[in-house]
Amino acid sequence: RKDKLKSQLRQKSYSFKARITRQMRKIKETIGNYSSEIIIAALVVIFASVFVIWFIGKEKTIYIWDYANYFYIYKDLGSRFGIDIFGAIRSIISSVRHDEYNSLPTVFLLPVYFVLGETRLAFILAISLLYSAPTILVFSNLIKNIYRPNSFFQPNNDAAVIHQPVGKNTLLLISSFFLTLLPAFWAPTMRGYLAVVGVGLIFAVIIFYLKSSLISKSYGELILIGAILALLILLRRWYAFWVVGFFVSVTLKELLFFEWRKFELTRLAIVFRHIGIIGLTSVVLFFVIAMPLALKMLGSDYDVYSAWRSSFSFRWLTIPIYHLGISVLILCLAGMITAFCRRSFRPAAFFLTANLVFTYLFFIRVQDMWIHQFFLVLPIFSMFAVICLIEIYSRLKSNASKLLFTFVFLIFSLINFSAVFVPGFDQYVGPAKFLFPIHRNYPMVRTDLDQIRSILEVLDSKTKGSTKRIYVLSATETLNAGTLVNGCRKFGSQFDSLRERFYWTSEVDKRDGFPFQFLKSDYVVLSDKERHGLSRDFERVVWQLRERIVEQKGIGKAFTRTPGSFPLQDGQNMLIYEKTRKFSASELREISDLFVGYYPELRERFEITPQMIKELSDEK
């Protein structure tokens, strides 16, 4: 019996070892099959880490506006999770349902917060490693499947490859290196935007849509596409423009390439039913998850964003050149033409082009594209550029010519990258400067941090231990409410209480309305020079109130300048004015009538009512 038991134990031991051996063999085979992807992923992670560490190490600034929004959401959410996890979850749900800048994109960055902390470096590293790097890998996989024989994009094996076949490693290298070294891909991340996660989701939608015909897709695939589209809008509301462009381009593509010679009403009905399922899924999910935000979007007056829209006639052409540069834009256009020349890829090329055009035109009718909003069109621009590069490579005969092409491609990409991010690099490119993007995204450095700290110390001494409040009457990138409020955060806990004494500032008239809180402020910080962040016509509140205070007329007579000035790096000087008396009723009526005259259609947002006049003035 003992021998039998030993034999059974020995057999079980052998069986267990055999299973372990088989599993290890499978793991090794998997690693071997994806060794190229693993190596490229490691290179991307190393490059991203080194670049971010260098870039953030060069910055000495106070982060403001959109450069700061998600950074402080990241910090606040991380600290809240450490104190009250259930309260943090409730705040996330509320934020997703109501806020334009909701905390959903920062949730997935929290693992880095708990490992590396709440610094700016940790925040940008989190975006780069958890959002940017995976997006590059998804993009390279997308390109690989466009060109490989028997891929889901190429049902006809003979149409998969033009001229000499392009190896998998070549496809992965060209696509991943192109996006990794594309300045427009990294610029928003370096400024603290989280919108790059949407680029990865757009690539995912393109993969799921193009990998099979719409009519053959299962309900699960259709619902998945709709869910990703809803998630896109939840992450940033302006991705709704891409979603609208998607439905327009899908509809046109399905109609244009429908086999009308074999017209079957049933098949056409299935096509529209499947488009409807995708649309219904995205709309229902978005409304169920974020009903208040959805209603707010539907009721928004998008004319308020005209403040960010240029009046230049050819801005539709200059925006891509500004972000991509003329050389990359030419690559994109050549790739688009090449894609249409390939019969098997023509339907996909039409879909991509239509999506690009409609999304672009829809958005620039509202406002211009800043660096993060350019993500609406960057995915498809990138696809066409890489298609062009691969088509050129595939036509080269000798290994020497391929090696030379790869070398030139990498060198040019590095120069293009450095021109945008490395201060002073422009002097080395000379007359070739026109080939590169117009936009420069250097590390932000302020030389006036000591002056900002000084004015904060003065304001703290004037308001400490009181209920007095402060209003910043400026909306330039150098001086705005964020400069001082976030300066309090930067300079340490000694200014925590001062930060709470600043009023929220109205910077853009149609968006923010009249700053009624200004009328209750005890101190006003302004510039000695009239400067504007946007056009003067969109910042009348700022310059009209500033003019009255500086020139001591009308409502400005209630304020008196305090001693001292604080110079800024751009030649402005920060001044402090103290409110020394109540406003008169006539002063309040004058400023109210002025702004109601400017914006009669927004009367309720600019009118100082009789009740308010009675409360704020010396009128009895």
Image (cartoon, rainbow, N blue to C red):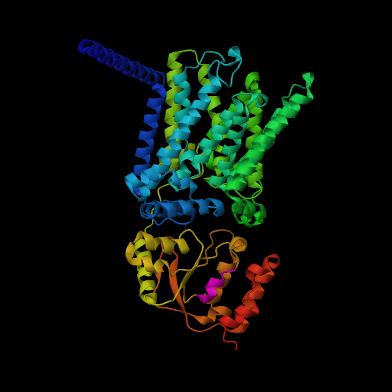
Quadrant of image for the C terminus: bottom right
| For residue 299, above or below residue 248 | below
Quadrant of image for the N terminus: top left
Is residue 9 toward the left or the right of residue 262 in the image?
A: left
Is residue 273 toward the left or the right of residue 145 in the image?
A: right
Residue located at (61% from left, 34% from top): 223
Q: Count how many numbered circles sit on residues in the image.
A: 0
Q: Is residue 55 visible?
A: no
Residue located at (58% from left, 31% from top): 206
Of the pair 285 and 426, the residue shown nearer to us: 285
Q: Residue 232 location in percent, x, y?
A: 56, 42
First to last magenta residue range: 514-520
Of the pair 250 and 593, the residue shown nearer to us: 250
In terms of image quadrants, where is residue 218?
top right
Considering every residue shown, the one lying at the far bottom of the view is 620
Q: Residue 178 location in percent, x, y?
A: 47, 30
| For residue 132, above or below residue 288 | above
Q: Is residue 502 magenta?
A: no
Q: Residue 477 location in percent, x, y?
A: 48, 58
In terms of image quadrants, where is residue 419?
top left
Residue located at (65% from left, 55% from top): 300
Q: Residue 367 location in percent, x, y?
A: 62, 50
Q: Which SS type dominates the magenta stretch? A: helix
Considering every residue shown, the one lying at the far left of the view is 2
Q: Is residue 604 visible?
A: yes
